[in-house]
Image: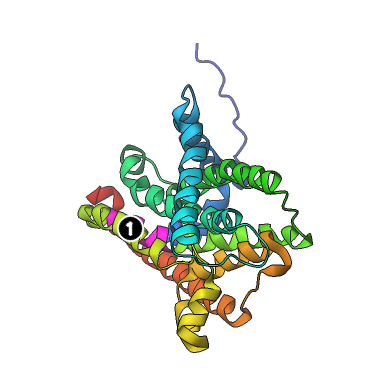
């Protein structure tokens, strides 16, 4: 005997999560980015765990590298070259206030450049907004930034330097540092995927950027040497606005900030971010084929 047919109720539209639609990825890309936000945190947490779990060198190096860099810059530029500090702040604190954002940006660029290549297996097998991969690398660099910030607190205690209420504006300039790192990071990531030898160019860009940024010296020295017009041209380097902002927030009343220069740096940072997003979105379609 045949069993009586069973009735299956029709599925409602909300029960489906599969889209078959031309141009769906393009149309819903940024919504997918939000839907895949947990993947962003998972990738960032994985990279942090790999770097710091069951190792002493990871956390120690995150503290030792900026500290040694600060010592070398303080000796060379303060003791040997005789360059002045900012206001009444000790030269070591002035240098470290500029070293914090610079190391965040440089680490973010270095990590983002290799992020897609390192995750080639995942890129070629499953779909997700590829911009998540370099974005996760930038968040990992923020962990190093927070660890290094501890050294700044120790220096303030050592020199008995009390920050002013300006320190409350520091998160704003930290967000600006993320914007500065994300734009070039996306460009370098896409270029590294298409041209593998570009990974050899990235360290040169980072090294040149350090000398072109007021890390070991005050930007007021540049203004005094180049004049106002030359200084505004110098501010086309978006890192200048970030470093000046950090020093303005950390060093207090003695630190000055150029409104025009900061606006120029911010504008360049936004333009680089837009250019990075456009170029990355244009090239990411072929990542799975060329990687």
> Magenta segment: does it hold 186?
yes
Residue 28 at what x, y percent from top left?
51, 58
The answer to whether residue 69 is above or below residue 190 is: above
Left or right of 119, for residue 133: right
Residue furthest out toward the top: 1
Residue sitting at x 43%, y 47%: 133
Instruction: Count how many numbered circles sit on residues in the image.
Output: 1
Residue 22 at what x, y percent from top left?
41, 60
Residue 23 at what x, y percent from top left?
42, 61
Residue 146 showing in the rendered view: yes
What secondary structure do most residues of the magenta stretch adopt? helix
- Return the residue at label 1: 190
Residue 32 at what x, y percent from top left?
52, 52
Q: Nearer the viewer, residue 120 or 153?
A: 153
Q: Residues within 10 Å of mark 1 (few under 14, many from 20)?
A: many
Which image quadrant for residue 213? bottom left
The secondary structure type at the circle numbered 1 is: helix
Q: Nearer the viewer, residue 219 or 31?
A: 219
Residue sitting at x 31%, y 54%: 203
Which image quadrant for residue 262? bottom right
Left or right of 178, for residue 287: left
> Magenta segment: does it hold 61?
no
Stretch in magenta: 184-192
């Amino acid at each position: 005997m045949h069993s009586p047919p069973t009735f299956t109720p029709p599925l409602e539209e909300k029960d489906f999560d599969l889209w078959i639609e031309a141009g769906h990825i393009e149309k819903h890309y940024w919504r997918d980015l939000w839907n895949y936000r947990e993947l962003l945190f998972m990738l960032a947490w994985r990279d942090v765990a790999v770097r710091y779990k069951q190792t002493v060198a990871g956390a120690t190096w995150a503290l030792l590298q900026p500290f040694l860099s600060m010592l070398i810059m303080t000796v060379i530029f303060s003791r040997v070259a005789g360059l002045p500090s900012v206001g009444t702040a000790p030269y070591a604190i002035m240098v470290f206030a500029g070293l914090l954002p610079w190391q965040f940006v440089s680490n973010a660029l270095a990590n983002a450049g290799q992020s897609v290549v390192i995750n080639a297996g995942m890129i070629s097998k499953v779909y997700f907004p590829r911009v998540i991969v370099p974005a996760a690398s930038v968040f990992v660099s923020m962990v190093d930034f927070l660890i290094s910030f501890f050294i700044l607190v120790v220096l303030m205690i050592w020199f008995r330097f009390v920050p002013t209420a300006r320190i409350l504006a520091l998160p704003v300039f930290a967000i600006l540092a993320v914007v500065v790192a994300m734009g070039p990071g996306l460009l370098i990531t896409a270029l590294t995927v298409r041209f593998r030898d570009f990974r050899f160019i990235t360290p040169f860009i980072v090294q040149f950027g350090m000398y072109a940024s007021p890390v070991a010296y005050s930007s007021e020295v540049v203004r005094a040497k180049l004049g106002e017009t030359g200084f505004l041209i110098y501010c086309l380097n978006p890192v200048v606005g970030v470093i000046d902002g950090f020093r303005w927030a950390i060093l207090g009343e003695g630190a000055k900030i150029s409104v025009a220069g900061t606006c120029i740096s911010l504008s360049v940072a936004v333009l680089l971010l837009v250019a990075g997003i456009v170029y990355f979105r244009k090239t990411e379609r072929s990542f799975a084929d060329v990687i």
